């Protein structure tokens, strides 16, 4: 087996977004405010004026103080999308610890009927949704068998997820669904003025041009639930408008962080099965298969750059990535005076999750306190962008904007899934397939007045494009690892 000569054919184009951007598209013009302006240039160039998270404005600062002064004697009613996955089960762990603060009104999941039945019996939701009618039927039968005395409304499919996301009694929706499937339910929940605990990064990566205006229109709080963006959000608490200079996202480096580029590429050529096995095993975090592979390619970090742009408004020039193998510093911000603020903690997804559902409060949790002396050493280094070409693909898509980020996300999801399905694709096929979709989308790129239909159409198109390209690779018996 050998690496095809075209495996990384176009990646040399990615020094900038110009490979995907029509010449007529220019950077956003300078914006003038009475208050100081965020960013390293001090001009606001490239910054998003309406970030999705409640940060970097007078209104958000006032809201934070107002909510904080209410104290921790609060009760939130949750709808948890993806309740049987890692995000959902860890959110329910938080409910167990803080039963006076949280109540579960709706749960949605895939086809894990046994676990859903246990959750229904324990938390008594009003709605329980599964992905198929067969699973929903099995759940009802199992709950009857268990003697469920408070039967929820059992629904299924896309309509079932929407019912769970829009249940009238819930005030916060935890979006733990992987991929673009979380986009529609998130939009409908926002329209009903529900706060979003955002664990589904693809919602903003694909839908940012639609989501951010809706957040502003309906006045909801979008609260990051993944570790890096939660860290940034926590660091921004109390930071006045215009004081943010730069965002620094930390990355574990994934499964291949201890391999040089040459070592990785040699392993790809000589032992593709070992590469496949290692790429789906994370050294630090207990995550789902899709996210674990994204970490191995570092596409997860590229996607997080785009998410950070929409969440916090930072320009792509002011969002950096640094590899931090210990996964203790979850991310940092730099303020205008060049001070750096960092959020530290063990690699435990419950920490960002609890802040997303309790913000701005700090609930007392029974977790192991951080001991820096126990760690002894924290290290940081720049990512090797030749080793991780997906990083530059993400920056290129983000700088291009519009529908390109939706194409990037969908192409990555499809390539990721095809690799894990073991149909004959190699590790280095992943960035090649993504770049191919981005290149093909240039002629149909839309950068203004982007609608949900535009995003969904691009999502469908990009997935099909990757499927077709993957099939050609398979037909040509070219295993590019």
Image: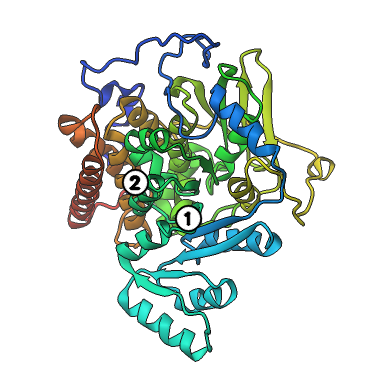
Question: Which residue appears farthest toward the right when viewing the image?
Answer: 373
Q: Is residue 34 visible?
A: yes
Which residue shows up at 28% across the image and 34% down it? 404
Q: Which mark is residue 176?
A: 1
Judge the density around disc 1: few (<14), some (14-19), many (≥20) Cα neighbours within 10 Å.
many
Could you tell which of marks 2 and 1 lies nearer the N-terminus? 1
Q: Is residue 481 above or below residue 78?
A: above
Instruction: Say left or right for 15 vs 230.
Output: left
Query: Which residue does the numbered mark 2 point to in the structure image?
Result: 412
Residue name at image x 60 percent, y 17 percent: 243
Q: Residue furthest left?
A: 443
Q: Nearer the viewer, residue 289 or 158?
A: 158
In x, y percent, where is residue 92?
60, 63
Q: Is residue 330 visible?
A: no
Element class at badge 1: loop
Q: Nearer the viewer, residue 127 or 142?
A: 127
Image coordinates of residue 199 in percent, x first then y, are 50, 49
């Amino acid at each position: 087996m050998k690496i095809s000569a075209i495996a990384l054919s176009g990646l040399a184009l990615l020094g900038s977004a110009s490979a995907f951007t029509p010449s007529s598209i220019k950077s956003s013009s300078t914006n003038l405010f009475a208050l100081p302006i965020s960013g390293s240039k001090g001009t606001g160039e490239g910054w998003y004026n309406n970030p999705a998270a409640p940060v970097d404005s007078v209104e958000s600062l006032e809201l934070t103080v107002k909510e904080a002064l209410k104290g921790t004697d609060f009760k939130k009613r949750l709808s948890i999308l993806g309740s049987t996955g890692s995000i959902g089960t860890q959110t329910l762990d938080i409910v167990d610890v803080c039963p006076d603060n949280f109540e579960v009104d709706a749960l949605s999941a895939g086809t894990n009927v046994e676990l859903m039945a246990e959750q229904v019996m324990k938390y008594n939701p009003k709605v329980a949704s599964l992905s198929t009618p067969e699973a929903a039927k099995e759940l009802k039968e199992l709950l009857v068998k268990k003697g469920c005395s408070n039967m929820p409304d059992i629904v299924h499919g896309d309509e079932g997820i929407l019912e769970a996301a829009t249940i009238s009694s819930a005030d916060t929706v935890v979006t733990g669904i992987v991929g673009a499937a979380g986009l529609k339910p998130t939009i409908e929940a926002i329209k009903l003025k529900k706060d979003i605990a955002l664990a589904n990064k693809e919602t903003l990566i694909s839908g940012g041009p639609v989501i951010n205006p809706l957040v502003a229109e309906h006045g909801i709080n979008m609260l990051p639930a993944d570790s890096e963006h939660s860290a940034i959000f926590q660091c921004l608490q109390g930071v006045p408008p215009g004081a943010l200079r730069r965002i620094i996202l930390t990355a574990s480096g994934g499964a291949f962080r201890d391999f040089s580029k040459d070592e990785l590429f040699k392993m790809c050529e000589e032992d593709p099965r070992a590469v496949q096995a290692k790429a789906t095993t994370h050294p630090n975090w207990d995550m789902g298969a899709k996210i674990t592979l994204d970490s191995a390619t570092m596409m997860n970090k590229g996607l997080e750059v785009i998410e950070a742009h929409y969440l916090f408004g930072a320009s792509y020039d002011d969002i950096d990535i640094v590899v931090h193998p210990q996964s203790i510093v979850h991310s940092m911000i730099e303020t205008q005076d060049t001070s750096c603020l960092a959020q530290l903690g063990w690699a435990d997804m419950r920490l960002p999750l609890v802040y997303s559902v309790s913000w701005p409060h700090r609930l007392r949790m029974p977790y192991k306190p951080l001991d820096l002396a126990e760690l002894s050493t924290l290290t940081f280094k720049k990512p090797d962008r030749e080793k991780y070409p997906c990083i530059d693909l993400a920056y290129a898509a983000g700088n291009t904007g519009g529908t390109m980020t939706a194409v990037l996300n969908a192409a990555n999801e499809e390539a990721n899934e095809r690799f894990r399905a073991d149909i004959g694709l190699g590790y280095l096929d992943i960035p090649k397939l993504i770049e191919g979709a981005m290149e093909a989308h240039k002629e149909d790129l839309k950068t203004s007045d982007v609608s949900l239909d535009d995003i969904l159409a691009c999502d469908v198109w990009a997935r099909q494009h990757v499927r077709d390209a993957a099939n050609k690779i398979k037909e040509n018996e070219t295993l590019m690892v």
